[in-house]
Amino acid sequence: MKYQTTMPENQKIIAIDLDGTTLMSDNTISDYTKDIFHKVEEKGHLIVIATGRPYRLAIDIYRELKLTSPMVNFNGATVTLPSDKDWKYTHKRYIPKDFVFDLLRHQQNFELDFIGAEYRRKFYLNNFQGVSPAVFGVSKFKAYNHLRLNRLTSDPHAVLLSTRNPDRVGQAEKIQNHYGDQVSVSAWGGPDSILEVVPHGVNKAYGLKKLVEALDYKKEQLIAFGDEYNDVEMFQFAQTGYAMKNASERLIGHADEILPWTNNESGVARKLEELFL
């Protein structure tokens, strides 16, 4: 299927985060949410997943929601159309593999327990000990997931790090300062001490801007739903940013509206029903 561009001004792009936003805490989607999403799209609006997840951990959700829109992954590093690998607006950014090699040399200096290179369909991890496979979306690690220098033959889209420094935000800033404008480093929310590295200047707003331009929308047609700090730039770029009731305090100050519902209460769907149905 070839995706059509140029959309009427009364139609909206609805950017949805997944974890803590569209997905319930058990990683499922309510039937109510699926039904509302379908009805909203029937009205001509476009629902777009904008997630930090790699493609391999989002495509099943995309299919479950029966979406046909482009998808933004790796916090904006890739914009693809799952149904068309030759989509002319496909956009991908990469981290040089030499950066990963350098991180491996500095692993102890940066107090890192593991370094993981993330690709569209695969990942490599240099240390399995004490690492939850769920972080990488698998039930258990396989031998071919082990990060070896001879396996890192292409540039990854993102790099995940685990720090034993309790000040993960401060540690992210330390790594950022060391590498300057080579990459962008941020700390995950939630209980895991995970840092994420993406290409310099990449965030969800970056990916959505590429998408808005490709589809010949205006940014005023974009609304967004999120719950964590990696949604800040998306909220700043969108006409309206809706934070979940369960959103991080680090995001709430950037939201235009805080929903009275959590992700476990299908908050995104409830607001979409209120807005469009």
Image (cartoon, rainbow, N blue to C red):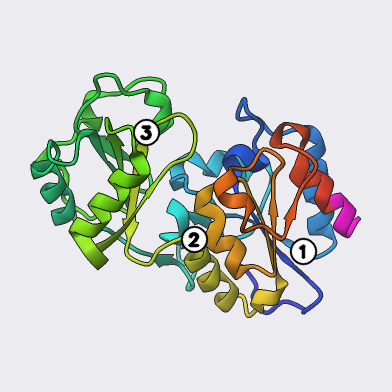
- Mark 2: which secondary structure? strand
Q: Is residue 101 above or below residue 29?
A: below
Q: Quadrant of the C terminus?
A: bottom right
How far apart are labels 3 and 1 at the CA level?
37 Å
Judge from the rendering whether residue 139 lies leftward or rightward of residue 151; answer left or right. Answer: right
Dot 3 alpha-carbon crowd within 10 angstroms: few under 14, some 14 to 19, many 20 or more = some
Residue 80: assigned label? 2
Residue 199 visible in rendering: yes
Q: Which residue is mark 1?
A: 45
Judge from the rendering whether residue 254 lies leftward or rightward of residue 125; answer left or right. Answer: right
- Which residue is painted at 46% across and 54% down in the image? 75
In front: mark 2 or mark 3? 3
Sequence-first disc among 2 and 3: 2
Q: Which residues are magenta?
A: 273-277
Q: Main secondary structure of the magenta part?
A: helix
Dot 2 alpha-carbon crowd within 10 angstroms: few under 14, some 14 to 19, many 20 or more = many
Q: Is residue 69 above or below residue 174?
A: below
- Which residue is painted at 63% across and 51% down in the image? 252
Dot 1 alpha-carbon crowd within 10 angstroms: few under 14, some 14 to 19, many 20 or more = many
How far apart are labels 2 and 1 at the CA level?
18 Å
Q: Is residue 104 magenta?
A: no
Tag 3: residue type? Answer: Ser
